[in-house]
Image (tube, grey):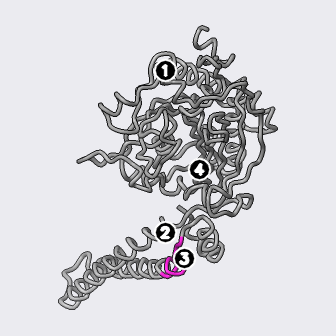
Amino acid sequence: MLDIQFIRDNKDVVQEKSKQKGYEVDIKHLLELDNNRRELITKVDELRQKRNEQAGQTKNQKPSKQQIAVGKELKEKIGATEAELQKIDQDYYKLLKQVPNMPLDDVPIGASEDDNQIAKTVGEPPKFDFEPKNHAELAQALGWIDKERAAKVSGARFAYVKGDLAKLHFALINWAISVVTDKETLQAIATKAGLKVSTKPFTLVLPPLMIRTDMYDAMDRLEPREDRYKIEGEDLWLQGSAEHVLGSMHAGEVIDEADLPVRYVGYATSFRREAGSYGKDMEGIFRLHQFEKLEMESLTSPEVALDEHLFMIAIQEHLMQELGLPYQVLNKCTADIGKPNAHGVDINTWLPAQKTYRETHTADYMTDYQARRLQTKLRRADGQTELVHTNDATVLSQRPLIAIIENYQNQDGSIRVPEVLKPYLKV
């Protein structure tokens, strides 16, 4: 969440930028609650001080009836004021948590994803001398995807991924892991992007697939709840992406500055309801309730956090270029970057059958918005502490797999393997 002092000092800006992100938040009422809350905190402190002073006066003697009456009155006033403060606190934090993170100045103002701006296009879409098929047609013909039996076992929007497609999936994941865990490769990516960032490798993590409500809420990724899966009878949810359980790992901790950046790459089977999906998104494995995903998460000091965001995007671009897939980089607009995000970038990859670019990667920069609720801090060399900044970004999911199937298809329905993956398939 945002620093309340920032909101006090920039109330009009916060109101306007919240609206730009699509959130109608009553900042005036929030600040009224804030003022009332501070007055009550002061009042409670003053009453407690008076009670302590009175207790000190009667420490070594029997209190008089008047002193007993005064003590009782102070106790009742403290109780009543604390109850009033508790009610104010509930309303105050509920409203404060509704305030979105502020978008950076270079985020395009827009009302929907249609207002996202194309920053660049890389690669040329392949030319076919036949009508390209979509990944679902190709994979089903090869016996790689079985949604009919998955529907029998699990319901709609699930799939069995089989045979060579499963092998290709793990080849893709293992190759990507080798990239983000190798210092020399990361150095080359940073140098090419012109970024002076740490080349500390990402630590591979197999995280829990469930997350407690308070941690999900602190990450500000729980909403919309109707898109999440709740475990019946438990204070647990199935995570919707690995960063939800990676970013919350260090909640309540103070990390030495010398240990930053903290970088994780997590592989997780993730779950989303994906309500409202339709059309081509329902074909094959493009949008399922259950999907595999490799995700980057980092915790850094504030001064290097934006470059960390750009570095993650550079890693994503490196992967796409090595795979030989045409793509576009999109600067997401205010309405599309997400509530906790200060900046967001998507990579959309060319799908020949749809004759358009579709989202395969996203990169999110949250400043200290998540860390404030998580209370994840760094300790400077001089002993001072402050909140860390957080970033997350897709390494690979099942969607680049779709792009490989469609962009590397042959007229006979067979699929070529990108050169970079052959060592991982022993082709």
Quarter of the picture holding the C terminus: top right
Who is closer to the viewer here, 308 or 319?
319
Magenta-colored span: 24-32
Q: Position of residue 295 (x, y in %)?
A: 55, 36
Q: Label 2 amino acid?
A: Leu
Left or right of 401 on screen, residue 373: left
N-term mark: 1 or 4:
1
Q: Nearer the viewer, mark 1 or mark 4?
A: 1
In whole angstroms, how far apart are the C-alphas of marks 1 and 3?
50 Å
Residue 150 against residue 299 in the figure, above or below: above
Who is closer to the viewer here, 274 or 199?
274
N-term mark: 1 or 3:
3
Left or right of 221 on screen, residue 363: right
The residue that mark 1 highlights is: 166
Instruction: Count the numbered circles shown.
Output: 4
In whole angstroms, how far apart are the C-alphas of marks 1 and 4?
38 Å
